[in-house]
Amino acid sequence: MRVWFDFFLKTYIHVRVRIVFSLKNKGAFVPFHHQFLLAQTVKGMVVAGKDPKFQQFTHFNFSGLKGQTKISRKGLHFYSSRVTLVFSTADKEFLDYFLKVLFDHKEIMIGMLQLAPELVEHEEPIAVSDSVKFLCISPIVLLPAAFNDESGKRFITPESDEFSDLLYEATMAQMQSSGKFTAAQLADSYKFQLVADKDYLNRIQSTHKKFARIYPLYDSDIKYEVRGYTFPFTLFAPPTVQQFVYEHGLGHFSHKGFGMLDMAHNDSIRKHSEMEVVYA
């Protein structure tokens, strides 16, 4: 008999949660770039629920898997007893639906990881202003992908106006498609400037590390490759836009796990908000 978390679903009012899994096989691994595996799993859960209004739903975002890891040629090996995933959506009904379907599964496989859904932690609301410093907890995709087209992998320096302009266009398109904003509200959101952390970029480049990499993703079983960027930055934009990108992600393919952000120095997880799901 399963003990459900109905109280959690009835009282939950925030848009971001941290899903905690217990890891059954410590030392198992996923590819270093594993967003496509997570996207396949999330899509599978959405389809499995068989609710017609959510089968094509894309207004959600999620991070990569987090835990104690070591890198090998095979990928990321996880050695912690628990692995976490941040999941975000502005649609509470969809979140309830997704979590119910997820916790119907006693175990799921992501790569070689055997994961059991264990509990959900609330992330508390954030306070935004016209200027917010963000960290990337999954890569930002600047350009869309197309079949047999390499343009999605083009490198654009984060310090250029083109970089900021492309993200502005993608954000406005997503805000419009969400149906939550009027034409007047979108017109008032013209202020948008991303300023990369120059010290971070210089430090990364001086150590010959990368802040921009090529990532695989799949759409209708077709493999694409895109360039993703991971670096801290300050975004200058109206609070409504700041809140939107925090909830929905920044850039393209947020529903495939790209573009998830967190605020710098944000300690939003509160242990008292945990609601454990128990199997018996």
Image (cartoon, rainbow, N blue to C red):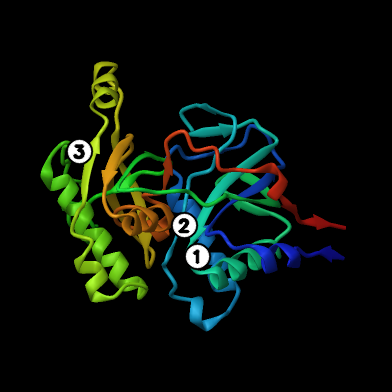
Residue 275, image x and y in percent?
73, 54
Tell me the number on the disc at residue 43. Answer: 1
3D distance between C-alphas at marks 3 and 1: 31 Å
Observer-nearest residue: 194 or 112?
194
- Indicate the position of residue 32 as horizontal and vertical percent values: 45, 37
Q: Looking at the figure, which quarter contains the C terminus?
A: bottom right
- Residue ranking furthest to the top: 207
Report helix, strand or loop for mark 3.
loop
Q: Is residue 128 above or below residue 185?
A: above
Report if the CB atoms under discs 2 and 1 are less than 8 Å apart.
Answer: yes
- Please name the residue shown 65% across and 47% down the image: 20
Q: Residues within 10 Å of mark 2 (few under 14, many from 20)?
A: many
Badge 2 is on which residue?
Answer: 39
Numbered disc in front, either 3 or 1: 3
Q: Earlier in the sequence, mark 3 or mark 1?
A: 1
Q: State the mark number for residue 158.
A: 3
